[in-house]
Amino acid sequence: MPSVGGKGLPLAIRLYRTRALGLALGVVCVVFAIYPLEPPPWVWAWMLINAFVWPHVSFQLTLRASQTLRSERRHLLFDSFCGGFWVAAMQFNPLPSVTVLSMMSMNNVSIGGPRFVLAGWLAQALGVAIGWWWVAPGFIAMTSQAQLYACLPILMLYPLVLGWICYRQAQNLSRHKRELLALSRTDSLSGLLNHGAWKDQLEIEFQRCRDEQRGAVIALIDIDHFKLINDTYGHVTGDIVLRQLSKVLRQNLRSTDQAGRYGGDEFCVILSDMPLNRATQAMDALRDRFNALTYDQNPTLRASLSIGLAPYQPGHADSISWLNDADLALYQAKSGGRNRVSAAQGTWLRSV
């Protein structure tokens, strides 16, 4: 049974395709170089097997290997050995020999870097030695015009294909890095920014407000009696409530607003370029929508929000002092009866 996993199969398929193409193009080069030498029939038979049978055998062996990369490294070293053998069989005809050896080295460096290239050179040297011993030794110093043209397909097409594969790999790597970065900044339950990522955005917004003398409002949002919801209805229901609040935030905030999960049942929002009165209205409307949504989902569940707002003030020493004002406003909303919005203005608070 094939044992190549989800990660190994793409590598096996990619190398199978490049090996099949490279050997099919390379055999044209070798045929034109060897034909004038009138080699014995077994050389022709081995050439056909190496060019048209070995890629499929190699692929099946890799599919059954427990370690895809290690298997393919062995196969690439065998390719290098065969390349060295054909160089000797061609009696070192300059252009075909350089073409074959350079294509093998290109494969080796693409999968294993400089150290593997060295290993490939050693395999090529071994192939040259065996080929020199097994086939009649000789040296051809000139490449004919026909042999030159026979080398052009592999010289033109193979580097193009290999370059395209490397380009696609670079694209995939860049996409994976972006996805990992997004995951590292995202709260898995809510899909919003996590605590650290939101704090980073807060620092950016604070500097922007200070440098450009523009306004913004922080909103800290707490689900009232969330522990009681978990204890009464279970943690699955609690998670549903958290996701519902996340959904309400995404649906009702502007694209320029930054929403995150601050921790537990507490959420946070940066409302850029918004005066306090409009922020108060927006958060009060959001609170009503959340209350209505949770009631529609479960009429016995009484979930509500306490929200604390703090506008940016030039007197804030840093983003933490700004956040502390929002935290004090949230405390005021909770101590004032919950299910309400409290806004901080300077050193005083007012409840809505």
Image (cartoon, rainbow, N blue to C red):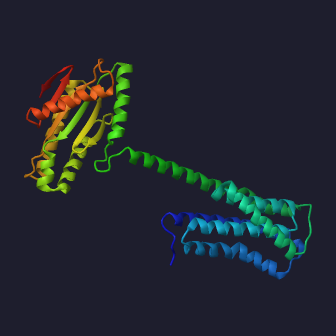
Q: Quadrant of residue 306?
A: top left
**Residue in the foreground of this view, choosing between 71 and 23:** 71
Q: List x then y, in percent, for residue 296.
A: 12, 50
Residue displayed at 70% across by 67% down: 77
Q: Quadrant of residue 194?
A: top left
Q: Is residue 7 visible?
A: yes
Residue displayed at 37% across by 24% down: 208
**Residue in the foreground of this view, choosing between 165 and 308:** 308
Q: Given the current orientation, which residue lies at the most extreme bottom position?
A: 41
Image quadrant containing the C terminus: top left
**Residue in the foreground of this view, choosing between 343 and 262:** 262
Residue 313 as seen in the image, left or right of residue 72: left
Q: List x then y, in percent, for residue 330.
A: 18, 32
Q: Quadrant of residue 138?
A: bottom right
Q: Is residue 341 visible?
A: no
Q: List x then y, in percent, for residue 229.
A: 13, 50
Q: Check the image and report above or below for 290 versus 124.
A: above
Q: Check the image and report above or below for 129 versus 265.
A: below
Residue displayed at 53% across by 64% down: 10
Residue 15 as seen in the image, left or right of residue 252: right
Residue displayed at 27% across by 35% down: 269
